[in-house]
Image (cartoon, rainbow, N blue to C red):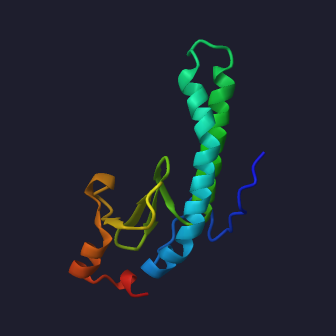
Amino acid sequence: MTDAPETPQIGRRGVARAFTLAEAQALFPLVRRLTAHAYKELEPVRQLLERTVPTHPEIPDIERQYETIVRRWVGKMERLGLVVKGLWLVDFDTGDGYLCWKFPELRIAYYHGYHEGFDGRRPLHEVVEELDPDWAHG
């Protein structure tokens, strides 16, 4: 049913790895392409689910299709070593926090510590300028 690009296995599924900024940026085009593909695949299912009466007998099948698409995307992101934080939201672990990206953003432009979460993310350029972290140079 899908013609999505093959996802390389960088690590064991569910095991995040530490990325330098350069490594994250090199992997980003694939992450964005896979996410855009999954989003495009899910959107008609989401719309169908939204406009179907909750008691309709096909709801369980539509929900299963939705879940299958999302789980497939999550599996691909995890195999790449990313931490999935929500639908279309992934983090690249740097060893001291996360480079944070949410579809449809065009680049990795935010960072947050391990305890701040999405709401605490800061522009990446500010963090690099202020803290000069090791992961920004590797």
Q: Residue furthest right?
A: 1
Q: Could you say which is closer to the camera, residue 30 or residue 71? A: 30
Image quadrant where residue 97 sits: bottom left
Q: Could you say which is closer to the camera, residue 3 or residue 60? A: 3
Residue 119 vertical position relative to residue 18 in the rendered view, above or below: above
Q: Residue furthest top?
A: 55
Q: Residue furthest bottom?
A: 137
Residue 96 vertical position relative to residue 66 in the rendered view, above or below: below
Residue 130, position as x, y percentages in the image = 21, 79
Q: How many marks?
A: 0
Q: Is residue 78 visible?
A: no
Quadrant in the picture for the N terminus: top right
Which residue is at 42% across, 67% downward?
A: 108
Which residue is at 43% across, 68% downward?
A: 93
Residue 88, position as x, y percentages in the image = 50, 51
Q: Is residue 79 left or right of residue 105?
A: right
Q: Could you say which is closer to the camera, residue 46 or residue 94? A: 46
Residue 107 vertical position relative to residue 52 in the rendered view, above or below: below
Q: Could you say which is closer to the camera, residue 60 or residue 51? A: 51
Image quadrant where residue 115 sits: bottom left
Q: Is residue 111 visible?
A: yes
Residue 114, position as x, y percentages in the image = 33, 62
Image quadrant where residue 136 sits: bottom left
Quadrant in the picture for the C terminus: bottom left
Residue 24, position as x, y percentages in the image = 49, 74
Which residue is at 63% across, 53% downward?
A: 37
Residue 79 vertical position relative to residue 119 in the rendered view, above or below: below
